[in-house]
């Protein structure tokens, strides 16, 4: 019995250690096995000199010490004075001594408040490394960056780094409900345990803040855009305050979603009309109440008059009236209103893709200075691929904020491996042509296109209380990649994948090269087996799980997949050309002409903009029908290759994470075939053509696929 207990204890210890790896995200800080690399780092970090005594400074030194001890196996001495050489000097501009401030004066003159400096300096003929910035949060960012250099085995011999974020607001939008369910959440329940707050502070809140600070995220919206007014009551505000206190030392501001009808629901008013004096006073008083508790409260995110949410239009007012009323309430405290442009109406079924532009573009220049309009990356709804939203670049007097979805609502949930930074980069690099060639979406959101002072980028969170945070181990890379692109929208997805793999798994090149390539190809694989050649929104309705191109019986036309693909005997695709809905006219002329012409429209967007004959010849010489079939098959084959790559990586990865990804890839392979077979069988009814040679024949009937129901699919 004793030996059995011992074996069980060893199992528990082993399981705990492995589980901890899954929990640690990209902050693994694994011991460096290469003695030559390790020695270089040890020689350059013989001591740590810390200036500053704030809570953030203490967290920074603790993080640095933890990283160095784990990666180098030795604990450097921490001092408050500089002795000898090869010290790592940590401190903000205000906490450094005058001699160090003088050395870094030129560097400080060039940087912003959130920028950090990592520099090798000569101090009294002795070599030192200094990490600094204008404030303690900037120093924390610098330390995380420095630790990443070590994690990824980069040289620290002669450093001269000054890095500034390109956007002001870098924020996660949690679609978390007060009952801890998460809309479009595929990684368990909400992190926020409202029942135990404010008195019980879960360690996960601290680790969440650490992870976000490590990639430069500086804000979090705690609650769902389909808002609940109760979050604005004192009962919940004291809980929000407790979270704000945890996040503050990590540079993270708390924001809340504002339900527009809150003055009625919790304020006992008879209206929520933004022009009503009592309503205006109620919101001003509520803002003052929140800021008294949380002086650095960020502001409100608002979804109004969309998908049944209340808003100013309920009272004959417009988005400007609603946003500006709230902006006035938070302005005295430095708060911001993020007003979502995700609107569409059943009363205008001509083309859902046109509605947000038509509704918001005329408001350009009418919003208050502390309002930023939050726009989804595409005009429909977080599809595997969409052309960039036409609003980007089209409102020069209004700051626009990008909204990406990190959680994979339309991309296989947390069971499919999809590296989203590739999608994000594609959108950010898209040319709007609004000020001529080179007017990219990235320039529209970082303020450089029109010199907007308020800038931002938001990501709909994929985080839950699953042990590994995101449901799929590789979905952690989408959180990481979002943060890196929010800091710098010009980063390359391949660079991000390389960093994440090295920090999370291994620096072994035999592992990095094939797995990085797998990640980079993964998004295109999903597009191929779900929505190739510009198809979109053909997922089953409601839960958006699996294919449902046949759905046509829902009450609102734009809820039906048949509305989007319009397959008939003549062809397939949504005609948004000048001879169709003329959605192309919402883009700058250069982009409009590109999309409008069947010959110049990128084939990846073909069926988004055009209804195309089944016999139309693509650039590969194949008909549209054959090309569609080959794309679906290619997607399935790409997942099979992903499985092959991962199976060869076993010796570089701990067994738990290896097996977890292996099982998930098996699910992805089955579901890729499901998508291929169901869609090709359905569209074949209209094309009337045989599947070309090389396409696997379906093993089930179309009726079988139509019969599948998923009443308990997650995320609803």
Image (cartoon, rainbow, N blue to C red):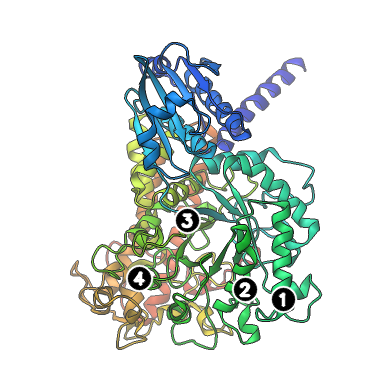
Is residue 388 found left or right of 213 in the rendered image?
A: left
Q: Residue at x 49, y 35 (%)?
A: 139
Residue situated in front as seen by the camera: 12 or 622 = 12
Q: Which label's residue is closer to the chain start, 3 or 1? A: 1
Q: Is residue 540 above or below residue 580?
A: above
Separation of disc 2 and disc 1 at Cα? 9 Å
Separation of disc 4 and disc 1 at Cα? 45 Å
The image's mark for residue 279 is 1
Residue situated in front as seen by the camera: 594 or 549 = 594
Q: Which label's residue is closer to the chain start, 2 or 1? A: 1
Element assignment for label 2: helix
Q: Quadrant of the N terminus?
A: top right
Q: Are marks 4 and 2 in contact (CB under 8 Å)?
A: no
Q: Which label's residue is closer to the chain start, 3 or 2? A: 2
The image's mark for residue 325 is 2
User: Which of the two discs, 3 and 2, sits closer to the camera?
Assistant: 2
Q: Could you classify mark 2 by the number of other residues whose Cα lies within 10 Å: few (under 14), some (14-19), or many (20 or more)?
A: many
Q: Are marks 2 and 1 in contact (CB under 8 Å)?
A: yes
Element assignment for label 1: helix
User: Which of the two discs, 4 and 1, sits closer to the camera?
Assistant: 1
Q: Residue at x 58, y 27 (%)?
A: 62
Separation of disc 4 and disc 3 at Cα? 23 Å
**x and y percentages locating residue 694 in the rendered image:** 28, 61
The image's mark for residue 670 is 3
Is residue 466 found left or right of 33 in the rendered image?
A: right
């Amino acid at each position: 019995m004793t030996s059995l207990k011992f074996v069980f204890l060893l199992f528990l210890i082993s399981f705990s250690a492995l589980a901890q790896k899954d929990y640690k995200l990209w902050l693994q800080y694994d011991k460096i096995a290469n003695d030559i690399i390790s020695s270089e780092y040890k020689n350059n970090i013989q001591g740590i000199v810390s200036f500053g005594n704030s809570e953030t400074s203490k967290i920074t030194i603790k993080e640095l010490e933890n990283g160095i001890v784990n990666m180098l196996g030795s604990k450097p001495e921490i001092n408050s004075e500089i002795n000898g050489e090869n010290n790592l000097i940590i401190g903000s501009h205000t906490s450094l001594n005058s001699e160090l401030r003088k050395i870094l004066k030129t560097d400080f003159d060039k940087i912003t408040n959130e920028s950090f400096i990592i520099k090798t300096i000569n101090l009294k003929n002795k070599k030192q490394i200094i990490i600094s910035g204008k404030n303690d949060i900037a120093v924390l960012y610098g330390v995380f960056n420095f630790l990443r250099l070590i994690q990824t085995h980069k040289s620290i011999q002669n450093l001269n780094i000054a890095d500034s974020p390109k956007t002001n607001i870098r924020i996660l939008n949690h679609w978390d409900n007060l009952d801890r369910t998460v809309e479009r959440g595929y990684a368990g329940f909400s992190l926020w345990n409202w029942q135990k707050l404010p008195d019980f502070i879960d360690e996960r809140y601290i680790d969440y803040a650490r992870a976000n600070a490590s990639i430069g995220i500086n804000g979090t919206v705690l609650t769902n855009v389909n808002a609940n007014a109760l979050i604005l009551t004192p009962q919940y505000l004291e809980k929000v305050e407790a979270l704000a206190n945890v996040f503050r030392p990590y540079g993270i501001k708390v924001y809340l979603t504002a339900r527009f009808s809150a003055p009625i629901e919790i304020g006992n008013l008879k209206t929520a009309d933004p022009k009503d004096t009592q309503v205006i006073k109620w919101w001003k008083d509520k803002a003052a109440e929140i800021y008294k508790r949380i002086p650095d409260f960020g502001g409100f995110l608002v979804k109004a008059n969309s998908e049944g949410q209340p808003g100013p239009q309920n009272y004959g007012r417009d988005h400007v009236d609603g946003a500006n009323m709230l902006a006035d309430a938070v302005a005295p405290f430095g708060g911001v209103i993020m007003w979502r442009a995700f609107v569409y109406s059943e009363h205008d079924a001509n083309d859902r893709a046109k509605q947000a532009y038509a509704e918001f573009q005329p408001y350009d220049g009418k919003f208050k200075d502390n309002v930023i309009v939050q726009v989804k990356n595409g005009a429909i709804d977080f599809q595997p691929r969409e052309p960039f939203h036409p609003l980007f670049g089209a409102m020069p007097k209004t700051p626009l904020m990008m909204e990406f979805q990190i959680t994979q609502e339309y991309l296989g949930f947390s069971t499919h491996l999809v590296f989203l930074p590739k999608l994000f980069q594609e959108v950010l690099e898209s040319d709007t042509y609004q000020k001529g060639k080179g007017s990219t979406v990235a320039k529209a959101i970082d303020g450089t296109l029109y010199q907007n002072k308020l800038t931002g980028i938001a990501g709909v969170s994929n985080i839950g209380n699953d042990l590994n945070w995101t449901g799929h181990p590789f979905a952690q890379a989408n959180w990481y990649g979002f943060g890196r692109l929010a800091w710098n929208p010009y980063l390359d997805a391949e660079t991000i994948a390389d960093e994440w793999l090295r920090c999370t798994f291994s620096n072994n090149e035999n592992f990095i090269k094939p797995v990085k390539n797998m990640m980079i190809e993964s998004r295109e694989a999903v597009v191929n087996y779900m929505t190739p050649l510009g198809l979109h929104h053909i997922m089953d309705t409601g839960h958006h799980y699996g294919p449902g191109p046949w759905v046509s019986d829902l009450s609102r036309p734009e809820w039906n997949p048949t509305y989007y693909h319009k397959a008939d005997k003549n062809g397939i695709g949504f005609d948004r050309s000048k001879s169709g809905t003329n959605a192309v006219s919402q883009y700058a002329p250069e982009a409009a002409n590109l999309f409008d012409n069947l010959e110049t429209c990128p084939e990846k967007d073909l069926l988004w903009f055009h209804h195309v004959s089944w016999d139309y010849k693509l650039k590969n010489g194949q008909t549209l029908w054959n090309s569609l079939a080959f794309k679906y098959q290619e997607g399935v084959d790409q997942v099979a290759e992903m499985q092959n790559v991962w199976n060869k990586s076993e010796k570089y990865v701990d067994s738990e994470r290896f097996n977890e990804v292996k099982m998930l890839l098996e699910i992805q392979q089955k579901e890729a075939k499901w998508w291929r077979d169901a869609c090709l069988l359905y569209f074949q009814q209209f094309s009337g053509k045989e599947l070309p040679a090389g396409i696997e024949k379906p093993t089930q009937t179309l009726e079988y696929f139509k019969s599948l129901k998923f009443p308990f699919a997650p995320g609803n």
